[in-house]
Image (spheres, rainbow, N blue to C red):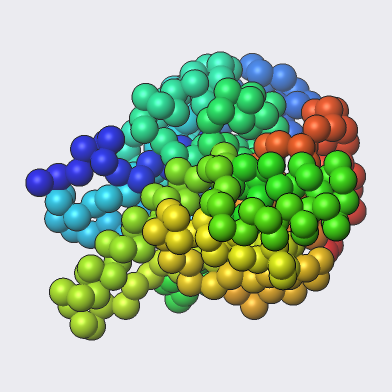
Amino acid sequence: MAYAIDQKLVIAVASSALFDLTESDRVFRERGLEEYRKYQRENENVPLGPGVAFPLVKRILRLNHKGEDDRPVEVVLLSRNDPDTGLRVFKSIEHHGLDISRAAFVNGGNPFRYMNSFNASLFLSANPEDVRKAVERGLPAGRVFPTKFTDREEDVELRIAFDFDGVVVDDSAEAVFKKDGLEAFQNAERSGAGKPLEKGPLARFFHEIARLQQLEKKRQSRDSAYTPRLRTAIVTARSAPAHERVVTTLRAWEIEVDEVFFLGGIDKSRVLKEFQPHIFFDDQLAHIEGVAGVTPSVHVPFGIGNEPTPELVEEAFREYQERGRDV
């Protein structure tokens, strides 16, 4: 029996996350909408290059198998383009051999509005306003950051890394740290060590990825020659004694993660360079700036760590770009 859309893990991507639209965006900003439309039509048959989310999308679609009853993953395109200018995006999808057939073109509207229509458990975009508004509505969304990451075609595994607080779980523990300091945070985590934390903005996506891993293991049990292609990690600034609550939460959710790193303030890039994820999710801009140069990274603007105004967030992003992303 084929998977219905409500039974699949669905990732929604904006064209700005899937492809490199640097030149297209420059035309839009400098020359306006009509010139942008003209530019896209004139370059309709020129394939767009891979964007930040491309390695994730390419590999997660490979977890689908040939039979209609063994295709648990879908990627849909949610685009601010109209269908006319969006034709270049679909031709680029075909050029790169991506199995994407569903899309919504909203002609300048908010594409994330249609996440629930497609049963999407994640929305990725380079548009900070779309992502911020989506998260404010309680939708699971993240903003992709520029990267110098070079994908290796011979590497067939998909590796996904998550920060913990403010991403997988809520920011209640982080709020204690921000308000009262490290000692109060550690005391609170000691006393609450046996109590699971509440779900965070990407909890559903995290659960769906865990479900995919179980399907991969079932495939291996049926075919000993099959090697599971999905690997996960949690990379958190927590350390002992705050580590126990991470384990408690994962046990309560009945989820196994392949690798967990309690870094206690060590720069996350030192671990991520070795793990080499195809996507990393974090709620802290400072952490994203430190790792985006070496791995595709997504900022999840959720909770107390993202209370600064959108203007300040955008200023930080521009400053990051001006430094040439040399991290």
Q: How many marks?
A: 0
* Left or right, 174 with reference to 80: right
Left or right, 285 with respect to 255, comes to right
Q: Is residue 323 visible?
A: yes
- Determine the residue positioned at 15% across, 51% down: 69
**Residue 261 versus residue 173: which sits nearer the camera?**
173
Looking at this view, name the residue that lies furthest to the front.
191
Side of 212 relative to 70 (left or right): right
Residue 129, relative to residue 210: is it above or below? above
Q: Is residue 48 left or right of residue 103?
A: right
Judging depth in this view, the residue of 95 and 215 nearest the camera is 215
x and y percent of residue 225 in the render? Answer: 23, 83
For image coordinates 62% across by 59% down, the residue present is 193
- For the residue pair 239 and 75, the one nearer the viewer reads as 239
Please give the name of the residue rendered at 48% of the width and 72% of the height, measured from the top-left corner: 258
Q: Position of residue 37 (x, y in %)?
A: 58, 23
* Relative vertical location of residue 184 with respect to residue 102 in this rendering, above or below: below
Q: At x 32% / y 77%, what residue is drawn?
A: 227
User: Relative to 147, is 244 above or below?
Assistant: below
The x, y position of residue 46, in whole percent, is 52, 44
Along the line of sight, the residue nearer the viewer: 224 or 204: 204
